[in-house]
Amino acid sequence: MNRYGRRAFVLASGAAAVVRPASGQPMPSAPPAADLLARRLFFSAPDHGDAVLSPDGSKLAFLAPVDGVQNVWVAPVGDMPAAKALTKATDRDVFDRVWWPQDDRHIVYFRDRAGDENWQAHAVDIESGESRALSPEGARCFVQQVSARFPGELLLAHNQRDKSHFDLYRVNVASGESALVFENNAYADLFTDTRFRVPFGMRYREGGGWDMVKTQGQDAGKVYRAVPIDDRYCTELLAASDDGKYFYWLDSKGRESAAVVAEEVATGKQRVLVENRSADFSEPIFDPVKMTPIAASLIYTRRRWYPIDPSVAPDVDRIQASIDGDVTDFGLSNDRENWVIYAEPAQKPGRYFHYRRKDRKAVPLFSARAGLDEARLVKMEPVVIPTRGQLRLVSYLTRGVGSEMGQPGPMVMLVHDGPWTRVLPEFNPFHQWLANRGYNVLSVNFRGSTGFGKKIANAGDGEWGDKMQHDLLDAMEWANNERISDELRIAIAGAGYGGYAALMGGCLTPDRFACAIDFGGITDLVALSGTGPAYQKPLAPSLKVRMGADGTSEEGRRFLASRSPLTYVDRLKCPLLVAHGANDVRVPVAQSDAFVAAMQKNKQPVTYVVYGDEGHVFHRAVNRISLAAIAETFLAENLGGRAEPVGDALKDANLEFRAGRELIKGLG
């Protein structure tokens, strides 16, 4: 619901057993392939990221490395060689998004400490280079709203006062002065407009669904709109027009998928702007001054933009026709005359373009990863896979470099996190890295994934470790039948929920996978229900429906235990690699500690590595690169693919092997 912030900032059976090669049988050699690409090309900070135009359209803020660490840069739009670094972070990357607070003078960015995800806001003056903190240390903060009505100011939300709720503050970015706008004691989320008013708060209901509640005036506390459980994934209040006449929604009421809808504030009458049954529309790009929608994208297998504002429809169509690949995102100057566009060709890293409407031409700016521009990359193919549950799941396959069509090869099933997200048709460094090592890579938008309408999203409720896991197994059978995967050489891997799915796959179908990799995965749903950051507490009713139970009753605890990898740890047979950030607030490292301890008690082999200065997502390039080195060496020894020599990849990383380093022979 927050246009600028929170969005940017979580029992399988039925498959036949596979007979494995006898112990000691030699692993098939890796197929011949193109030159091995250095892992740093995939996991270092991008050369350029999140390019954003200044409100007047004359300058470009973007992220780029300084001595290997992602920092904030600025350049005149027509003079990229004049770019200069504004920040000098040396320990860990600046967060992946920056903002102009409508004054053409300051850029707002965020940093956390050692992966604790307490994102602190900072503003840097592009002329003096001076930075100042805009929010307190130790509080999680995000940008709630920027407005052309208030240049140099913005609304920030943070939870310093109450870790369970986010209060709103009006902040002057030049002085750092901050004034409380709304003390929040009841709502999971807040909705604001360009006048920095707070008309609504969002509150989850027991049993599912949520209410949009009026927060101010004589009607404070009254429900403005009740969203039923079936629509909760596909309905969201996005923005209010600057003139106060319209609210804009993603709305699935009375339809299968999310449409972009305009609602008249005075009458409540709604009008559909764009809709499609096959998939949900994404949040539109809004005019930065009027806060009216320009265009919205629809992603089923690929991404396509649909103009909403007729005055820019020719520009949107011209851009899509003239730029190679999918246009992933774009932003406009306040006068709409200058645009910055990000697009991804099918077999290249993403590229940024500057589009001037008067010239009707998109001029290249720079590549996201220039080191891969001439590399032999592989197209990420969309495939639609039928399941035993009569669902058709959009999935993505990247074939291993050197693999032959019609000849089965080793495969990594890479499971997405969330799980209430989706795999996108975009440059995916994990897919490309693994494909370069000779592996076919398959990622499935299993039930519970979002973006495909209500049926698939709601089909995941209560199905962790059960039907959601069945979908992965059905996709694996599809790959076997299509002669894509060698059924004796399949790995399952993922982070967060993906790590959970990897563990469930290894435990409940131990004869199906040659090895498994778990990055920060959930091992005990009972323990997880009593932990996690305080700001997730308002979401508890929704999480209970999604997961099928919570830990507040004996019955609920039994159910969660039945869906937990820790319950089945003794069944695990395949080699396992576990990695975790020591400061993970979403999935505490105690989850992996407990699982590995149980394996050691059972004398089951496991390799376990912990990163002391990371959380759920790794923000230090040296740590990402070291983990890739460990993982590809592990995969090479268990699937027979290729691996870049480890070399000094582990040297500068903040890691500790807590178990089983000796089990991966290639680590030395």
Image (spheres, rainbow, N blue to C red):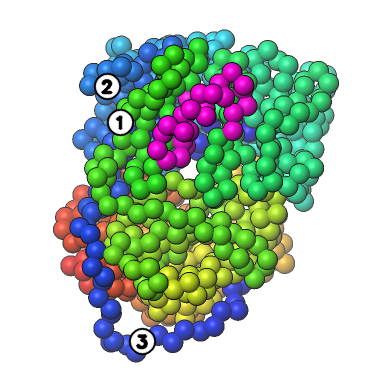
Q: Magenta span covers which residues? A: 306-331
Please say if 140 is above or below 412.
above
Quarter of the N terminus within the rendering: top right
Residue closer to the observer: 515 or 196: 515
How crowded is the residue under tag 1: few (<14 C-alpha within 10 Å), some, or many (20+)?
Answer: some
User: Image quarter for residue 189?
Assistant: top right
Quarter of the C terminus within the rendering: bottom left
Q: Amino acid type of disc 2?
A: Met
Secondary structure type for disc 3: loop
How crowded is the residue under tag 2: few (<14 C-alpha within 10 Å), some, or many (20+)?
Answer: some
Q: Amino acid type of disc 3?
A: Pro
Please name the residue that numbered disc 1 is placed on.
366
Secondary structure type for disc 2: helix
Residues at badges 1 and 2 in contact (C-beta under 8 Å)?
Answer: yes
User: Image quarter for residue 440?
Assistant: bottom left
Residue 471 screen position, x and y as percent: 58, 66
- In the rendered image, the residue lying farthest to the bottom is 22
- The answer to whether residue 29 shows anywhere in this view is yes
Residue closer to the observer: 195 or 188: 195
Please name the residue that numbered disc 2 is placed on.
80
Q: Earlier in the sequence, mark 2 or mark 3?
A: 3
Please name the residue that numbered disc 3 is placed on.
21
Secondary structure type for disc 1: strand
Residue 227 screen position, x and y as percent: 77, 40
